[in-house]
Amino acid sequence: MRKQRLAFSRRELKMLAKRLMFHPICMRVTLLLVGLQVSFVGLRYLLGATLTYGVASLAQYGDTVSGIYFNSEGFSILFRMDLTQMVLAIPVTYAQLIRFVVFSVVVLLILAPIRLGVMEQYWSMLRGSGEAGVRPVLRWFRQGGKFGKAVVVELLLGAGVRLAGILATVPSLYLFYLFYTTTPSMAAYTTTSSLLQIGATVLAIAALVFTFWLHSIFLPVRYCLCAHPEYSLGQVFRRGLDSAKGFRGAFFGFRLSYILWFLVSQVTYGAMDIFVTPYTSLGGMLFLQEAARARQGEATPQQEEQDPPQGLE
């Protein structure tokens, strides 16, 4: 069986996405989304709804071992690193935890429909049809069916994928725990210590890759919902997952090619999403569009000599 391939290269699709991202409609709705995202980041810190951590000198903790310690106001997670004479501390109060959960739920309920509304405008721009602008984005709040589906999909891509990623790091954390427990000083460093350290690092990297891969697996569900908001939730998941069928590995690689852009987004607390969001989203939509054409046998050798696609048919 002949292996399916896209009619256009990764570079061509990304170049087209880069041109489309500066369309006035695209930038206008993206500014609405990113402005809210950055505002919520600042508000989260002002309200104390963040979970923080710190590194302190081991001398301040004496013989306290690694573990979870409860008190009247909350609990603290301590991780001793005797080899470096440091302690990783994560103090959490119950009030802080409640604020974190409540704030996260409020942000989800506000940003989920807006994000899907913005993505819907991206699709409309590619199709060259539909009402364009900010007003259609806000309709995702007024239409209960669309609102509920947006929340479910964004909850999966956000909390669901992150929880899976946290669970995936448990093996690496355990090996790091064994490493620091059995290696209190350089004098105690052995071949076993080296193997534990290498193994923990490899598993930590593998957990990050797994989390990114899992997100790329479910991301087409978001694109499917914003392209077809009339679908039921079952249809959204079924057709969304099927949209990358035969190209899941290629789609993961395509998303991975944006890794530096995602890092820029993280270090700027989402401020650079004004460019990152449309660039990566439009690229993903174009990729899945071409994947659908390839599966349907529409991509022919003659198409490879044409210009990149200008939108959905």
Image: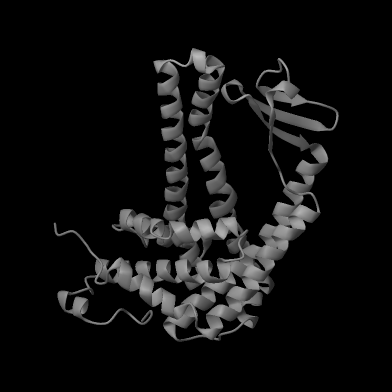
Q: Pick out the residue farthest to the front.
A: 187
Q: Pick out the residue farthest to the right.
A: 72
* Residue 11 higher or lower than 164, as above or below: below
Q: Nearer the viewer, residue 52 or 236?
A: 52
Q: Say if residue 148 shows up in the picture.
A: yes
Q: Pick out the residue farthest to the left.
A: 1
Horizontally, residue 304 falls left or right of residue 313, namely left
Horizontally, residue 166 falls left or right of residue 70, namely left
Horizontally, residue 200 falls left or right of residue 25, namely left
Q: Nearer the viewer, residue 167 or 35?
A: 35
* Residue 254 higher or lower than 66, as above or below: below
The structure residue drawn at horizontal position 40% and vertical position 56%, both measured from the top left corner, is: 256
Question: In the rendering, at what x and y percent does residue 12 appear?
Answer: 31, 73
Q: Nearer the viewer, residue 53 or 191?
A: 191
Question: In the rendering, at what x and y percent does residue 309 appear?
Answer: 32, 79
The structure residue drawn at horizontal position 50% and vertical position 71%, both measured from the top left corner, is: 278
Q: Say if residue 289 shows up in the picture.
A: no
Quadrant holding the C terminus: bottom left
Quadrant holding the N terminus: bottom left
Question: In the rendering, at what x and y percent does residue 145 appear?
Answer: 61, 67
| Picture quadrant where residue 310 is located | bottom left
Question: In the rendering, at what x and y percent does residue 109 appear?
Answer: 69, 61
The mark total stands at: 0
The structure residue drawn at horizontal position 50% and vertical position 63%, both measured from the top left corner, is: 222
* Residue 3 higher or lower than 182, as above or below: below
The structure residue drawn at horizontal position 62% and vertical position 65%, both measured from the top left corner, is: 271
